[in-house]
Image: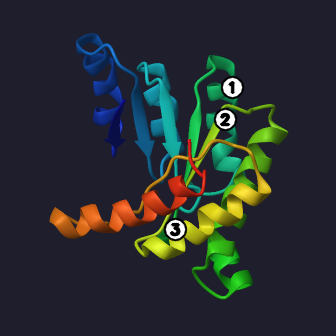
């Protein structure tokens, strides 16, 4: 799988050219701009990654979900501890595993209300143990597939250790897909 950051319209349009040169799925990573998700799908993206903390809420997400549903394109709800919704941060008193899981569950509910179920989830924090706790909590509440990871792990051996610990703990508990 190739995941590409779609930061502007030029990047979204480039997906069509990239797809001509590859034979594996291409995932468009979308931040802030739902129109880039729509353009990415029109350009041939095989899947999307949407961050509920910066996409702008239910109304802005709706046309993306409807288009993905109609095209049978899966969406990864990519919750990131660094960009959680303000109302959830207030409700849970900051960045907690509960805040992260609540963000994912609320977004799932929005998507399911539109008849969309091609969903996978990631719950990434730069703190490996916070990620682990969020994944544990989510796995007790939902059966949607989990894309495991630790965000902002950095570079070099420190990043490898941080990610290995977080992902290894979860896999050893049978959590993750």
In the current view of this chain or complex, which residue is farthest to the bottom? 93
Q: Quadrant of residue 159?
A: bottom left
Nearest to the observer: residue 53 or residue 97: 97
Q: Quadrant of the C terminus?
A: top right
Upstream in sequence: badge 3 or badge 1? 1
Could you say which is closer to the camera, residue 94 or residue 37? 94
* Name of the residue lying farthest toward the left: 156
Disc 1 on helix, strand or loop?
helix
The answer to whether residue 124 is above or below residue 10 is below
Q: Please name the residue shown 52% across and 68% down the image.
A: 131
Q: Are marks 1 and 2 in contact (CB under 8 Å)?
A: yes
Residue occupied by mark 1: 69
| Label 1 crowd (10 A; few <14 / some 14-19 / many >=20) | some
In the displayed structure, 176 sits above or below 153; it is above
Nearer to me, 63 or 26: 26
Is 89 situated above or below 76? below
Identity of the residue furthest to the front in this view: 172
Image side of residue 148 versus residue 89, left or right: left
Q: Which of the two discs, 3 and 2, labels the residue nearer the N terminus? A: 2
Residue 82, relative to residue 22: is it above or below?
below
Color scheme of the displayed model: rainbow
Horizontally, residue 63 falls left or right of residue 140, namely left
Secondary structure under the numbered disc 2 in the rendered image: helix
Report the residue that reaches farthest toward the right. Answer: 113
CA distance separating discs 1 and 2: 6 Å
Q: Position of residue 166 (x, y in %)?
A: 44, 64
Q: Distance between the Cα atoms at labels 3 and 2?
A: 26 Å
Separation (CA) of disc 3 from disc 1: 29 Å
Q: Residue at x 26, y 21 (%)?
A: 18
Say which residue label 3 marks. 131
């Amino acid at each position: 799988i190739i995941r590409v950051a779609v930061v502007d319209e030029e990047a979204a349009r480039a997906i069509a050219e990239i797809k001509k040169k590859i034979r594996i799925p291409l995932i468009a990573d979308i931040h802030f701009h739902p129109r880039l998700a729509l353009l990415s799908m029109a350009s041939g993206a095989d899947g999307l990654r949407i961050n509920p903390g910066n996409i702008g809420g239910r109304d802005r997400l709706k046309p993306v979900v409807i288009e993905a549903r109609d095209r049978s394109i899966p969406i990864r709800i990519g919750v990131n501890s660094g960009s959680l919704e303000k109302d959830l941060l207030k409700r849970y008193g900051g960045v907690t595993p509960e805040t992260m899981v609540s963000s994912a569950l609320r977004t799932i509910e929005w998507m399911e209300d539109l008849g969309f179920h091609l969903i996978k989830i990631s719950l990434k924090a730069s703190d490996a143990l916070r990620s682990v706790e969020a994944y544990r909590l989510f796995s007790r509440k939902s059966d949607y597939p989990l894309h495991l990871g630790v965000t902002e792990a950095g570079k070099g051996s420190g990043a490898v250790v941080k990610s290995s610990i977080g992902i290894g703990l979860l896999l050893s508990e049978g959590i993750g897909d």
